[in-house]
Image (tube, helix red, strand yellow):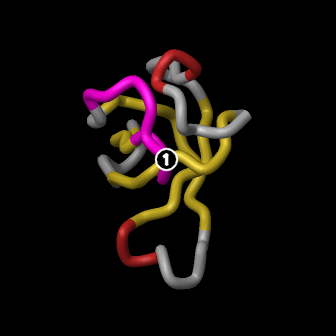
Amino acid sequence: MNGQHRQNIKIGGMVDIVLKQDQRTNKLTRGHVKRILTNSQVHTRGIKVMLEENNQVGRIVNIL
């Protein structure tokens, strides 16, 4: 499932995100959602979230 729709994202859910510094390489980082940072319901590049494990911030590519 892609991460463009806010309604699909649950706090504590497992996701793959792309960090800002990894946007050129598309390297994915996996973790659990701590906070949803994007206010809009839909975002074309992916909803921005913060991960629980290390507070990293990035846009969701996949919801697992």
- Tell me the element at label 1: loop
In front of the other: 24 or 30: 24
Image quarter of residue 34: top left
In this picture, residue 36 sits left or right of residue 31: left
In this picture, residue 23 sits left or right of residue 39: right
Q: Position of residue 60 (x, y in %)?
A: 52, 46
Q: Tell me the amino acid under the disc marked 1.
A: Thr
Q: Residue at x 60, y 50 (%)?
A: 61
In this picture, residue 12 sits left or right of residue 57: right
Total label count?
1
In front of the other: 34 or 22: 22
**Disc 1: which residue:** 44
Image quarter of residue 35: top left
Q: Position of residue 46 (x, y in %)?
A: 49, 46
Q: Residue at x 47, y 76 (%)?
A: 22
Q: Is residue 35 above or below residue 62?
A: above
Q: Is residue 41 above or below residue 38?
A: above
Q: Residue at x 33, y 52 (%)?
A: 57
Span colored in magenta: 39-47
Q: Is residue 44 above or below residue 5?
A: below
In this picture, residue 61 sits left or right of residue 19: right
Q: Badge 1 local density, few (<14 within 10 Å), some, or many (20+)?
A: few
Image quarter in which the C terminus is found: top right
Q: Residue at x 49, y 22 (%)?
A: 12
Q: Is residue 35 visible?
A: no
Q: Is residue 54 above or below residue 3?
A: below
Q: Is residue 51 visible?
A: yes
Image quarter in which the N terminus is found: top right
Q: Main secondary structure of the magenta part?
A: loop
In front of the other: 13 or 4: 4
